[in-house]
Amino acid sequence: MVFGRATRDGRGGEPLPSVLDWRGVTTFTVGGVERERAKGGRTVFGPRAVRVPRREGAGRIFPPCALIAAPDPDTSVLYEDREMLRVLCTVVREGADGRADGGERRYVVRDAAGREVGRVRRVPPARRLSRHTWRVEQPGRPEIVGRNKWAALSRQDAAVHAAGRIVGGVVDSVLSLGAEGGDAPRRDRTLLWTAGGEEVMRSEGVDFRVKAPWVERRLAFAVAVIGDR
């Protein structure tokens, strides 16, 4: 379902994609690209938003399902319309400095009426060489845990995967020698989001795919807006 009227791209061009209904979204990303033309075409940018990638001819469009505003560093507000009049939800970091004891970061997500939708926690690693993990608390559902894909593999599979990573790392290092400054772009890590032994969501950077229908989309959007950092 589509909400809101299409708007122009600001240069007298064709209409921008209309805002989609957020409720049924399963694949989304966060960014400002409205239209991505085929090779040689012009890319059209818009405001930062939760967007749904779709094919359009030889190019792609990214219609928004939630527009994002950040009134202050600790708050993000998601809107259901381009005019930013209808609030979908707010995401607020808890605590004066946004951090809880032990370096844990906590966020609360509320709907337009101020009712709590759920909570998101960024949990620091227990070991120095590990990465942080995520916890999503949705009322009436088991806790969702987001962790590196490696951590979700069996010990044997992880060992095989690690060996492949070492070989791949050597190859990447050799290839990067030809790049300017010898630097290769860092890849976003893939996170598996599980609840009760079930994979309910998967993400790579700001690209998300919701697999379980019961996952509250506003919490999934909040995780994407917060970012894996």
Image (spheres, rainbow, N blue to C red):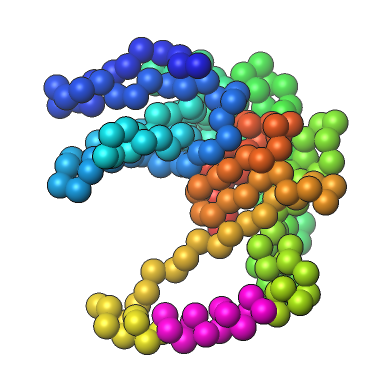
> Which quadrant of the view contains residue 228?
bottom right
- Is residue 158 visible in the rendered image? The answer is yes
Instruction: Tell me: residue 2, above or below residue 167.
Output: above
Q: Position of residue 15 (x, y in %)?
A: 25, 21
Question: Could you tell me which residue is drawn at 77 percent across and 57 percent down?
Answer: 101
Point out the image quarter for the C terminus.
bottom right
> Which quadrant of the view contains residue 223?
top right
Residue at the farthest front position = 57
Q: Position of residue 89 (x, y in %)?
A: 60, 26
Q: Position of residue 50 (x, y in %)?
A: 48, 35
Q: Closer to the camera, 2 or 108?
A: 2
Question: Could you tell me which residue is drawn at 32 percent across and 16 percent down?
Answer: 6
The answer to if 150 sits in the magenta stretch is: no
Question: Could you tell me which residue is drawn at 48 percent across and 42 percent down?
Answer: 29
Number of marks present in the image shown: 0
Q: Closer to the camera, 209 or 50?
A: 209
> Which quadrant of the view contains residue 123?
bottom right
The answer to if 170 sits in the magenta stretch is: yes
Q: Is residue 225 left or right of residue 92?
A: left
- Magenta span: helix, strand or loop, mainly? helix
Q: Is residue 54 left or right of residue 108?
A: left
- Is residue 45 visible in the rendered image? The answer is no
Question: Could you tell me which residue is drawn at 66 percent across and 63 percent down?
Answer: 149
Q: Position of residue 9 (x, y in %)?
A: 23, 26
Magenta stretch bounds: 160-172
